[in-house]
Image (cartoon, rainbow, N blue to C red):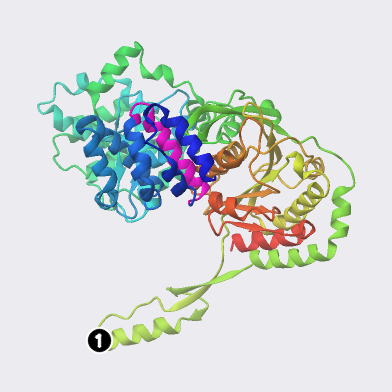
């Protein structure tokens, strides 16, 4: 924005405190030298402060622009909060002093490089738990991790591990464990009453909590094996005392419940050899839970009639496996959706979901703002597939050879106890050890092992009106070549289209799901892909990222194939659409998904860099080259 436009916007916000001698021209001129993203961030902050502290907002305009380029997104908002709090507690002069000392604030608040704050991932965690739970469970931060059966409380910040991924894993484990207490019946008894007759109720509570953690771990291993594996990485490797191992075996029985835990408590409370608490078990605040249960006027087990409960029944043979299969297909891992249909037939026809949307100007989410409708592409039984196969028969042979080589690629395992060749380095090292008086190693062989590919890919295909004609044709041709190649490779993949018109009618179109073969039905759906309406990209990313998060794989890719920037009616254009898409991609990365964009928009570099980063997109400047390039791009991303 130019200085004049910036000045006008600031004047509208600060009109109550502006006079002939108090102008925002100089701040506007300084802002004009910055990027559009930085300009919008600054104006949004002025708007926020001016609502209740207009005088502070004016001084902010005059003094805070230098801080805009030095404080990143994670530090900026807390800094604004601290300025407003100082203004309320100590007045304008103290707040202005802190405003000018922003570098000192940055240094004082700088966390460890791998540290992660609750506020950074609250949306992802909130959506994850809503996907798991059949009833709304609130999420909040606190000094300790615990649940009162209505709210799951997590630490404000975790810095235990050196990397963000490890600290996020701990957050997720804390979350899932507290949820498991509400799901698997920890609170079906009055814990305070159950422990009151023990000589030391506090110690009895500690032992009960550790035993109950063993039972909940077993429940999660049966229901959510992928999450349970992550949680196992956080547990101590120290072996349990034999009596505790007996308890672990008994509590791992599918029939074990909280009463089983109580029976083992009576046996182990006097043993005085307790295993270390797990990092994720948090605390049990039974009194707080009792207060909430009393307010609800009913027992928590009445809330367990939810999809997860039915899935438990299916796993133990009490429910039709077909229903269980459908329930396992329900996503459980990214921003909030609410499924309004659950029958198998409806799952194949259409679903309605709701998602939040990021409003960058207000720096907050719009709750349940996007309504997304999912349906299958209407199949067309024509000659498009055969024509495409004939048109690209030479290229297809080359792709087949390339992907076949990937599938058969072997890797060499070194320092094995037996194998098909000698590991020279290991032999030399072993010989050196013997001359030092050490025992020779027996791990002196190499072994050839076929590399196991663990890849799952979701392809998001732009079906907006702008893809009509030539673009639509090459999109479909590219998909045909990919599907033919991926059948050879064996990677799990799904294909969905996306379009829509307004926030109340976003659309995702099922073309192929992960567990479907490349069948005649899928081919006919590819042929039936037709241009629709607009491109509300954030909702589609949240929805399809949710589906992908359900798939167990070492590498999970969300590949978007599009011809342009986010664009929809109702204000979803320009910076608003770009920032919502960027936030949706951040949420997706938190789930261990790698997003990537393939576009034919030659003027897209600036906004794609903002959304995807510098390395996670490619621009294809000739539309007709897409079919030739897409298989090569896929190969590079997955090897």
As drawn, which residue projects farthest toward the top?
Answer: 297
| Residue 592 visible here | yes
Where on the picture, by quarter, is residue 268?
top left
Q: Nearer the viewer, residue 182 or 544?
A: 544
Q: Position of residue 144 (x, y in %)?
A: 25, 35
As drawn, which residue projects farthest toward the front?
Answer: 20
Q: Nearer the viewer, residue 165 or 533?
A: 533
Work out whether 487 lies above or below 355: below
Q: Position of residue 165 (x, y in %)?
A: 40, 51
Which residue is pictured at 83% across the width and 66% down the height? 394
Residue at the disc numbered 1: 436
Which residue is pictured at 41% across the width and 46% down the height? 73
Q: Position of residue 577 (x, y in %)?
A: 58, 39
Q: Which segment is the magenta one?
A: 34-54
Image side of residue 516 versus residue 615, left or right: right
Which residue is pictured at 35% across the width and 13% down the height? 296
Q: Residues within 10 Å of mark 1 (few under 14, many from 20)?
A: few
**Dominant SS type (magenta):** helix
- Give the position of the C terminus as an image quadrant: bottom right
């Amino acid at each position: 924005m130019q200085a004049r436009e910036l000045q006008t916007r600031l004047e509208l916000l600060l009109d109550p405190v502006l006079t002939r001698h108090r102008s925002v021209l100089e701040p506007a001129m300084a802002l004009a030298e910055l990027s559009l993203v930085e300009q919008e961030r600054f104006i949004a902050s002025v708007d926020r402060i001016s609502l209740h502290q207009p005088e502070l907002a004016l001084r902010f305009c005059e003094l805070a622009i230098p801080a805009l380029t030095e404080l990143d997104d994670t530090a900026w908002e807390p800094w604004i909060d601290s300025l407003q709090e100082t203004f309320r507690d100590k007045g304008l002069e103290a707040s202005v002093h802190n405003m000018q000392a922003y570098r000192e604030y940055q240094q004082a608040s700088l966390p460890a490089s791998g540290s992660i704050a609750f506020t950074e991932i609250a949306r992802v965690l909130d959506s994850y738990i809503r996907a798991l739970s059949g009833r709304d469970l609130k999420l909040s931060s606190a000094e300790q991790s615990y649940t009162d059966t209505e709210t799951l409380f997590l630490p404000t910040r975790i810095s235990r591990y050196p990397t963000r991924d490890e600290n996020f894993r701990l957050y997720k484990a804390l979350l899932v464990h507290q949820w498991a207490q509400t799901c698997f019946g920890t609170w079906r008894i009055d814990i305070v009453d159950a422990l009151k007759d023990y000589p030391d109720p506090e110690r009895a509570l500690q032992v009960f909590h550790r035993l109950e953690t063993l039972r909940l771990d077993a429940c999660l291993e049966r229901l959510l094996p992928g999450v349970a594996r992550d949680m196992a990485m956080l547990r101590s490797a120290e072996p349990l005392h034999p009596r505790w191992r007996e308890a672990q075996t008994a509590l791992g029985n599918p029939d074990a419940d909280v009463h089983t835990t109580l029976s083992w408590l009576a046996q182990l409370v006097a043993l005085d050899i307790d295993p270390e608490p797990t990092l994720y078990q948090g605390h049990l605040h039974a009194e707080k839970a009792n207060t909430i249960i009393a307010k609800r006027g009913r027992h928590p087990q009445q809330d367990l009639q939810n999809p997860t409960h039915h899935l438990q029944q299916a796993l133990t043979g009490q429910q039709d496996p077909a229903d269980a299969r459908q329930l396992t297909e329900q996503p459980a891992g990214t921003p909030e959706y609410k499924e309004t249909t659950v029958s198998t037939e409806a799952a194949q026809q259409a679903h309605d979901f709701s998602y939040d949307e990021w409003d960058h100007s207000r720096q907050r989410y719009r709750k349940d703002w996007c309504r997304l409708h999912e349906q299958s592409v209407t199949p067309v039984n024509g000659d498009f597939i055969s024509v495409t196969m004939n048109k690209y028969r030479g290229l297809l042979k080359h792709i087949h050879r390339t992907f076949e080589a990937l599938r058969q690629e072997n890797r060499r395992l070194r320092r094995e106890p037996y194998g098909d060749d000698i590991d020279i380095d290991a032999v030399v090292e072993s010989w050196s050890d013997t001359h030092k008086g050490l025992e020779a190693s027996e791990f002196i062989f190499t072994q050839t092992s076929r590399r196991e590919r663990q890849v799952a890919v979701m392809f998001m295909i732009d079906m907006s009106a702008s893809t009509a004609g030539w673009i639509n044709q090459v999109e479909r041709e590219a998909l045909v070549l990919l599907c033919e190649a991926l059948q050879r490779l064996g990677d799990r993949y799904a294909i969905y289209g996306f379009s829509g018109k307004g926030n109340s009618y976003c659309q995702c179109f099922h073309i192929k799901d992960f567990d479907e073969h490349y069948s005649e039905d899928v081919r006919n759906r590819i042929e039936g892909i037709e241009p629709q309406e607009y491109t509300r990209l954030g909702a589609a990313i949240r929805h399809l990222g949710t589906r992908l998060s359900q798939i167990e794989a070492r590498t999970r890719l969300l590949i978007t194939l599009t011809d342009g920037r986010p664009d929809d009616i109702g204000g979803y254009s320009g910076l608003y659409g770009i920032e919502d898409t960027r936030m949706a991609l951040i949420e997706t990365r938190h789930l261990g998904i790698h997003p990537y964009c393939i576009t034919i928009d030659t003027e897209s570099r600036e906004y794609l860099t903002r959304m995807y980063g510098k390395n996670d997109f490619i621009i294809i400047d000739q539309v007709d080259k897409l079919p030739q390039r897409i298989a090569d791009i896929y190969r590079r991303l997955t090897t």
